[in-house]
Image (cartoon, grey):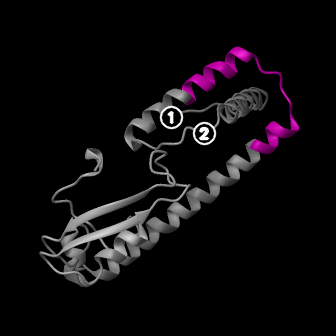
Amino acid sequence: PQDDMKAEGRPVELGGGRLLPEFEEGLLGKAIGEDIEIRVAYDDENPNADLRGKRALFKVKITDLRQKVLPELDDEFAKDLGEYETLAELRDATKAKLTEAAENKAKSSLREQVIEKLVEKNPVPVPPSLIEQQEQAMKRELAFLAQIAGPGFDFGESGEMRERAEKKVRAALLMGELARRENLNVEP
């Protein structure tokens, strides 16, 4: 057995989609105190390269069973959240937040499409040093995200990053030039 795959007292949620299907199926219908052996096969697409194409045997003992109980959706539930007096207020506020998020996403997508077309239609020479600076900034940001995400974080292809960095620099130069020509100022 591999020590890094051992876990004691670890809660496991069935039906959450986080477990291998064979593992989850091996637990279904079992009782507290039962010793179970579950065999799983990792596919060639597994994010953990060490597990790709391998088989494993898990020895499991069920020590406790719990069921999630969802609260009733009523005025008391809304009051427990602290900001609302009724379920209707909570629903209205949730609907407003979701609508605002969808609108912001649509605006952001449109803005990205416009900038992409501008960059495509207006080829601007870009100093390699600016591309290099942008690429390094993007790599630092990805490294930070990788620390948060943990093992298996995909950095993507190096060439893709350089291409994205160049597009960002071109877009920034074009937007700066447009702002200058149209005498646009950004104020806080």
Who comes first in sequence, dot 2 or dot 1? 1
Q: Nearer the viewer, residue 59 or 98?
A: 59
Check disc 2 and give the amino acid type.
Answer: Gly
Instruction: Kindly identify the residue that appears in the image at 58 percent across and 62 percent down.
Output: 103
Q: Answer left or right for 51 relative to 102.
A: left
Residue 70: x %, y % from top left: 24, 79
Question: Vertically, is 116 above or below 78?
Answer: above
Q: Is residue 97 left or right of residue 7?
A: right
Q: Is 130 included in the stretch rendered in magenta?
A: yes
Residue 120 in the image: x percent, y percent? 84, 39
Name the residue carrying label 2.
156
Region in magenta: 116-138
**In this rendering, does residue 15 appear at all?**
no
Q: Quadrant of residue 27?
A: bottom left
Q: Residue at x 70, y 53 (%)?
A: 110
Task: Identify which residue is drawn at 86% across, 30% down.
Answer: 123
Left or right: residue 16 compared with residue 181: left
Residue 145 location in percent, x, y?
44, 38
Q: Residues within 10 Å of mark 2 (few under 14, many from 20)?
A: few
Q: Which residue is mark 1?
A: 142
Q: Is residue 40 visible?
A: yes
